[in-house]
Image: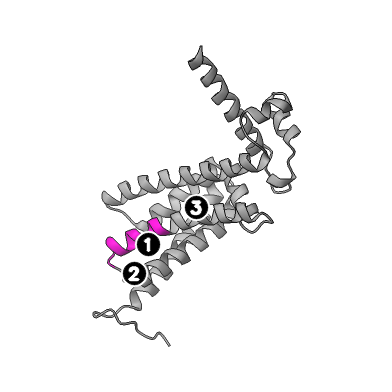
Amino acid sequence: MTGIRAKQKEKTRRALINAALNQLDPQTSFFSLSLREVAREANIAPTSFYRHFQNMDELGLTLVDEGGLTLRQLLRQARQRLADGGSVIRISVEIFMDFIANNRGVFRLLLQEHSGTSKEFRLAIAREIDHFKAELADYLLNERKLPEHLARLQADAMVRIVFSIGADALDLSAAERAELAEDTILELRMIARGATALQKPKGEYNDPT
């Protein structure tokens, strides 16, 4: 019986998470949702909500954590693909576009609350973005042999651009996302070439001016 109850509890918890995600759209932010709305969408009584989350803030932070976990898992897949040969830029953009297409609600939450009013949410989202940057910088440092400073700056620039175009990609068709991805890949290659041009054999930087 304990196992059955645990499975049912996880099923209801997942229903609450999906209910919140399903209600997020360009006009609806997470903080405009009410507990009653989420419970109704999940088809449970509002009082049952508290068996799974202390409050709506805890539910929202859980969504951020799950989104970050999904993204980190995709990044690990990207590292495996890169080990077999391939472009770090193309693979990174393709991975991110797949993430957006399959996790629209989570990405809307990340976009909406990245600069929102809740400091706790802003910090949680910043941590997830920093994980993404760190993974990419580590690859550029160890596999592309960029100096640490340039690897960090290139990773930062790439992530900023990719997250920015993610907002545009949310409501595009698959064909439009593919076209946007190709434009983004070209932009990121320009940044990568700039990082390479800044290098000298002894690690000094060229002045492009």
The amino acid type, in three-letter code, at marker 1 is Ala
Is residue 87 at least partly visible in the picture?
A: yes
Secondary structure category for the residue under label 1: helix
Q: Which residue is mark 2?
A: 148
Q: Mark 3: few, some, or many residues within 10 Å (few <14, many ≥20)? A: some
Q: Quadrant of the C terminus?
A: bottom left
Residue stretch rendered in magenta on the structure: 134-145
Given contact means CB atoms under 8 Å apart, are the residues at marks 2 and 1 in contact? Answer: yes
Q: Which residue is mark 1?
A: 137
Residue at 50 percent of width and 45 percent of height? 99
Three-letter code, disc 2: Glu
Residue drawn at 62 percent across, 48 percent down: 109
Where, by quadrant of the figure, is residue 123 drawn? bottom right
Does residue 189 appear in this view? no
x, y (%) of residue 72? 43, 47
- Give whichever of 145, 8 is nearer the camera: 8
- Tell me the amino acid under the disc marked 3: Glu
| Farthest residue, direction top | 1
